[in-house]
């Protein structure tokens, strides 16, 4: 028998608690069709024997660090799901911003588009569906990637011309209004700072540049674009910040003008905020204050924030009492906090006082004792003291520092009221 908590706990050696929960919720939703409400109601336990066997296999692969998108076989991009496999890169949010930059401009004159290094086809397909008047061509050097991209185009209903081409060895006469590329741009020396699951599973051919030619793909694409863009055409890249200005200088030398480097920061609309926050809340519990903090960072007006909050509450994406119960459970069981520290945490999250008291009163002394007793036993082994009195004094202060009340501490240690420094902590 499996349950949600057991599943995400299995991933905590590799991921933090929030990410572990998000991964499990995404798997349960995408592969097994379980909503957040289903998970909270315990429907994970009702999966068939075959589904439980498959779920266990998925968890075993996640425990090894394999990207969840490869395991499930899909990745989200610009509101659509794309099939992905180890032969193509997993689409990234920053690439979504590149597509939005292109489609939010004046696309009426863009009748021909070329995507160089298409991978899963996410850029080409997105542009084809958002710019239906344009004829879109997509290149890749990998036959495996082209097969995956063609499958995605067919499933999503996009008309794309796919071609096996190598930009480092190309000789064509075609002309285009727009050329776009997210080429390999990571230098091998950067690999030490990369996530292990990226290095172990994603295709290096699509990630890394030659060590001695870090902008070679930008240079060759720039050379091609200079010769094959129609008058008034545009070239778009996703860039490596380490070499962005070097690429810009090269394009300027070729003769390109109106060169712009963006950090992709944009104003977030009310609908975009709602969709992003709803997706976030579907992956893990969040409270109203956390949502407000995010919208403040997006510089959204207070009245807009409150409308988004009201909508999230109405659709049950956020519920401060539900959040408080999960918060209390996590902090007691996994962070080993006592009541006072848990309550302080809830206060910092701006949880209403009545909710705080109601949720905290649901936890009995036995649960705190279950946590505190082994903590004190472990701490006692490392304490240096010349007497039992001194040892107990240090243990009391340790427990008070973790937020346990003196009444709970007294049930674990042989101490009287003279040890009670609670009011001074």
Image (spheres, rainbow, N blue to C red):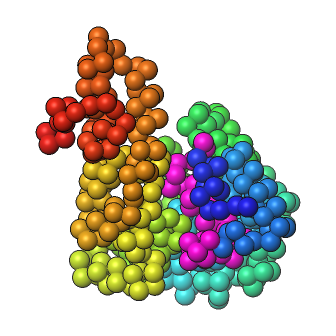
Which of 73 and 7 lies nearest the eye of the viewer?
7
The vertical placement of 161 against 251, above or below, is below
Quadrant including the C terminus: top left
Give residue 382's quadrant in the image. Answer: top left
Which of 408 and 286 lies nearest the eye of the viewer?
408
Give residue 44's quadrant in the image. Answer: bottom right
At x 31%, y 39%, the residue is 409
State whether the magenta stretch is mostly helix, strand or loop: helix
The vertical placement of 154 against 219, above or below, is below
Do we see residue 214 in this rendering? no
From the viewer's perspective, tell me whether residue 316 is left or right of residue 181: left
Which of 15 and 383 lies nearest the eye of the viewer?
383
At x 46%, y 66%, the residue is 285
Q: Position of residue 397 (x, y in %)?
A: 26, 32
Which of 317 and 395 lies nearest the eye of the viewer?
395
Give residue 111's quadrant in the image. Answer: bottom right
From the viewer's perspective, tell me whether residue 67 is left or right of residue 237: right
Q: Position of residue 113 (x, y in %)?
A: 66, 75
At x 41%, y 40%, the residue is 372
Quadrant including the N terminus: bottom right
Look at the image and give the residue range highlighted in magenta.
13-42
Do we see residue 95 in this rendering? yes
The vertical placement of 348 against 280, above or below, is above
From the viewer's perspective, tell me whether residue 59 is left or right of residue 105: right
Q: Position of residue 292 (x, y in %)?
A: 31, 70
């Amino acid at each position: 028998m499996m349950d949600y908590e057991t599943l995400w706990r299995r991933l905590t050696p590799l991921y933090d608690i929030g990410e572990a929960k998000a991964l499990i919720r995404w798997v349960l939703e995408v592969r097994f069709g379980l909503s957040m409400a289903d998970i909270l109601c315990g429907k994970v336990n009702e999966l068939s024997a075959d589904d439980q066997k498959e779920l266990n296999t998925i968890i075993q692969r996640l425990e090894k660090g394999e990207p969840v998108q490869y395991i499930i076989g899909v990745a989200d991009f610009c509101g659509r799901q794309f099939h992905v496999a180890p032969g193509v890169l997993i689409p990234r949010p920053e690439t979504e911003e590149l597509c939005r930059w292109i489609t939010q401009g004046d696309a009426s004159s863009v009748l021909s588009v070329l995507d160089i290094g298409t991978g899963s086809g996410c850029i080409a397909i997105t542009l084809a569906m958002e710019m239906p008047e344009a004829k879109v061509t997509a290149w890749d050097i990998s036959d495996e990637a082209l097969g995956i991209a063609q499958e995605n185009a067919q499933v999503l209903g996009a008309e794309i011309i796919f071609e096996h081409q190598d930009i480092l060895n190309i000789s064509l006469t075609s002309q285009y209004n727009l050329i776009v590329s997210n080429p390999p741009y990571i230098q091998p020396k950067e690999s030490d700072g990369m996530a292990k699951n990226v290095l172990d599973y994603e295709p290096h051919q699509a990630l890394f540049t030659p060590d001695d030619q870090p902008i070679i793909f930008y240079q060759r694409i720039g050379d091609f674009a200079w010769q094959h863009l129609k008058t008034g055409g545009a070239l778009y890249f996703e860039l490596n910040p380490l070499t962005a200005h070097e690429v810009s200088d090269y394009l300027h030398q070729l003769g390109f003008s109106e060169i712009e480097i963006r950090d992709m920061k944009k104003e977030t609309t009310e609908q975009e905020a709602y969709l992003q926050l709803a997706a976030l809340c579907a992956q893990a519990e969040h409270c109203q204050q956390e949502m407000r903090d995010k919208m403040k960072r997006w510089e959204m007006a207070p009245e807009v924030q409150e409308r988004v909050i009201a909508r999230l509450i109405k659709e049950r994406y956020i519920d401060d009492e539900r959040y408080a119960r999960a918060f209390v459970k996590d902090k007691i069981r996994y962070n080993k906090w006592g009541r006072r520290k848990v309550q302080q945490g809830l206060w910092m999250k701006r949880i209403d006082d009545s909710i705080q008291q109601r949720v905290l009163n649901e936890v009995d002394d036995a649960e705190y004792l279950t946590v505190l007793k082994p903590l004190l036993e472990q701490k006692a082994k490392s304490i240096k003291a010349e007497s039992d009195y001194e040892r107990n004094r240090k243990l009391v202060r340790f427990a008070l520092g973790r937020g346990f009340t003196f009444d709970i501490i007294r049930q674990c240690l042989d101490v009287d009221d003279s040890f009670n420094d609670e009011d001074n902590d």
